[in-house]
Amino acid sequence: MADLLIWLVAALGAIGGVVLGRRWGLVEGKRAGKREAERDAIEDKNKRVERGRDAVRDGRGYGDPAERLRRNDGNW
């Protein structure tokens, strides 16, 4: 009878370990995904800011004002 009880406790422990491991992996995966998404968003924002700064730098004081107006008029 004691052997059966030992096997039952061991089986329940193994099943509990598998369930706990799956839950833990799920939580860790979600955390890693969030961190990666935040990092990608920050990198994307930095690239957009840099492109905007380049556009402003190239647009202001670049060449003849009348020529800039003609070139910009085509964009509208």
Image: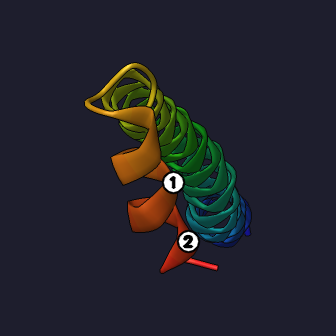
Q: Secondary structure at mark 2?
A: helix
Q: Nearer the viewer, residue 34 or 9?
A: 34
Say whether marks 2 and 1 touch (CB < 8 Å).
Answer: yes
Q: Residue furthest left?
A: 63
Query: Residue at the spot x=54%, y=38% of the render?
Result: 45
Q: CA distance from mark 2 to mark 1?
A: 6 Å
Amino acid type of disc 1? Answer: Leu
Q: Nearer the viewer, residue 35 or 75?
A: 75
- Answer above or below: position of 8 versus 43: below
The count of marks equals 2
In percent of width and height, residue 43 lies at 42, 35
| Residue count near mark 1 (Cα–Cα under 10 Å), binned few <14, some 14–19, many ≥20 | few
On screen, residue 35 versus residue 46, left or right, reads right
Query: Residue at the spot x=60%, y=39% of the render?
Result: 38
| Residue count near mark 2 (Cα–Cα under 10 Å), binned few <14, some 14–19, many ≥20 | few
In percent of width and height, residue 24 lies at 64, 49
Q: Secondary structure at mark 1?
A: helix
On screen, residue 29 versus residue 62, left or right, reads right
Q: Nearer the viewer, residue 38 or 53?
A: 53
The quarter of the rendered structure image containing the C terminus is: bottom right
Query: Residue at the spot x=69%, y=51% of the render?
Result: 27
Q: Which mark is residue 69?
A: 1
Residue 57's quadrant in the figure? top left
- Give the residue number, with chain letter if any, for mark 2: 73
Amino acid type of disc 2? Answer: Asp
- Answer above or below: position of 69 versus 53: below
